[in-house]
Image (cartoon, grey):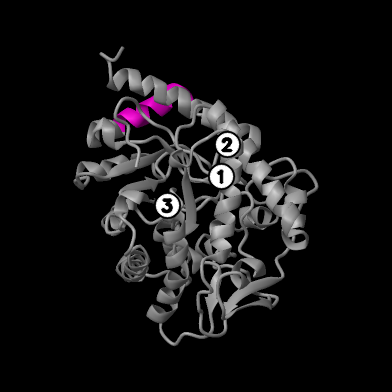
Amino acid sequence: MQRSTERILTTHAGRLPNPDNIAAILHARGNDPAAFDQLVQGGVADLVRKQMALCNDIHSDGEFWKARDEHYYNSRITGVEMQPLQADEWPSILGHQQERHMPEFREFYTIYDQLGNIPRPGVVNPRPTHKAVITGPMQYKGQDAIQHEISVVKAGIAAAGAQVEDFFFPLLGPGWLGHFLFNAYYPTEEEYVYAMAEMFKGEYEAVVDAGFILQIDDPGLADKFGLFYPPITVEAFRKHAELRIEATNWALSNIPEERVRYHTCWGSWHTPHTTDIPFKHIVDLMLKVKAQAYSVEAADVRHELDYQVWEEVPFPDGKIYIPGVIAHKTTTIEPPELVAHRIVRYANIMGRENVIAGTDCGYGNRVYPDIAWAKMQAMAEGAALATRQLWPHAA
C-alpha cells in the first residue's frame, strides 16, 4: 500500500459523481449487458482522467455502475428474494429511523425524505417498491460476476492510461450490507452475519488477486447506533458491531492486511446527526479490523474534534490513517489552508508518513458534481500546502 513518504498523498472514499449518460448506463444494466459493459468502461475511463487531472493520487473507478438490485444478488448468491414493500416499510433500516429519534426535526424530515441530499427543482424521490430478503440458504455462486466486473473496470483504467496499483476497489462489508438485506431465514444473528461474510469472502479475494487495494465499506460501525428504534445502549451496540467485525475479519482471513483499507463514517444523509455515536466508543473496535489503513469521517462539524481521541489512543505501528479533510454534507468548498491544517494536525499526532488525505465519504450523490470536483481540487491544493509544512527542507 502506498504511503506518504515524500509528500502527502490524496485519495477519497470511492463514490464519484455520475457520468452525464448515467440514465443510459442504468437502462443498459437491465436490458443490454454488452452495451452496459461498454458504457461502464467509458465512464470509468472518463472518471479516471478526471481524478488524474485534479491531482488525486489513489483512485477508484467511481462506483457509478454499482447497484444492490435483483441482478446483483442473483449473480452472486442463492436464497435472496426481492419482495414488495408494505405501506409502512422501507427497503433499508435507514427509512424514518432518525426521524423517530429526533421528533424536534420532524418538519425537516418531511421535506428531506422527498428531496434527499441534492434537491432538484420539481424532482421528488420515487417511493421504493421492493426490499431484499433472505428466504433460504445463502450459497455463494463463485467469482464469475466479480471477475467480469473487474475486467470491465480494468479495461477502463487501461483506456485512461492509468495503472491498477494506483487504485483501490471498494466492496461492502457484512455490517453495511445488513442495512439493506433483511433476514427471514437464519435463526440466529451470528448465522445471518456470517452468511453475508461468506458471500463476500470470494469477492474480496478476487479484488486483491486482480492487483487492487481492497476497501471495505462499513459505515455501519458508526452510523447504525443512531438507527436502532427504540435506542440501545452503547454497550449493546458494541456487542452488535463486534460480531460484524469478527465476521469481516473471517472473510479477510486469506488476504494480507497491507492489501486492505477500511472505511467507516456516520452516514451520508444531510441531516442533524445529533444521535451519532462518539468516535471514542468505537475506535478500539475499528482497530480490530484486519486492515492496514483506516478511512474515517473527520471533517464534518460533528466530528471535527475527533482527532482528540488519538491523543489518548495510541495509533498502532505500521498502520495508515486516512482522515476526512473534505466534508461531503456541505456545498461549501473548503479552503486549501483549512485542508492543510487538518492534514498537519493528524500528521503531528501519527507521523506524516502514516497520513493520507481523504474524504468523509463518497462525493457522488452527496454533493453536486461541480462542487465535488472543486472539493477534490481543494484537497490537492491543501495537500500541497501541508507537504511544504511537513517537508520544509525538500527540494
Q: Nearer the viewer, residue 358 or 332?
A: 358
Across and down, in percent, residue 44 comes to: 62, 42
Across and down, in percent, residue 337 comes to: 42, 22
Q: Amino acid at mark 3?
A: Leu
Residue 300 visible = no
**Measured Cα–Cα span from mark 1 to mark 2:** 7 Å
The residue that mark 3 highlights is: 214
Residue 301 visible = yes
Q: Nearer the viewer, residue 165 or 315?
A: 165
- Magenta span contains residue 343: yes
Q: Earlier in the sequence, mark 1 or mark 2?
A: 2
Question: From what the image shows, is residue 184 above or below residue 101?
Answer: below
Across and down, in percent, residue 117 comes to: 62, 48
Residue pictured at 30% horizontal, 42% vertical: 320
Mark 1 closeness class: few <14, some 14–19, many ≥20 residues within 10 Å: many
Residue pictured at 80% horizontal, 47% vertical: 122
The disc placed on residue 61 is: 1
Q: Nearer the viewer, residue 181 or 337?
A: 181
| Drawn side of residue 208 relative to residue 290, left or right | right
The residue that mark 2 highlights is: 48
The secondary structure making up most of the magenta span is helix
- Magenta span contains residue 282: no
Say which quadrant the C terminus sits in: top left
Across and down, in percent, residue 206 comes to: 46, 59
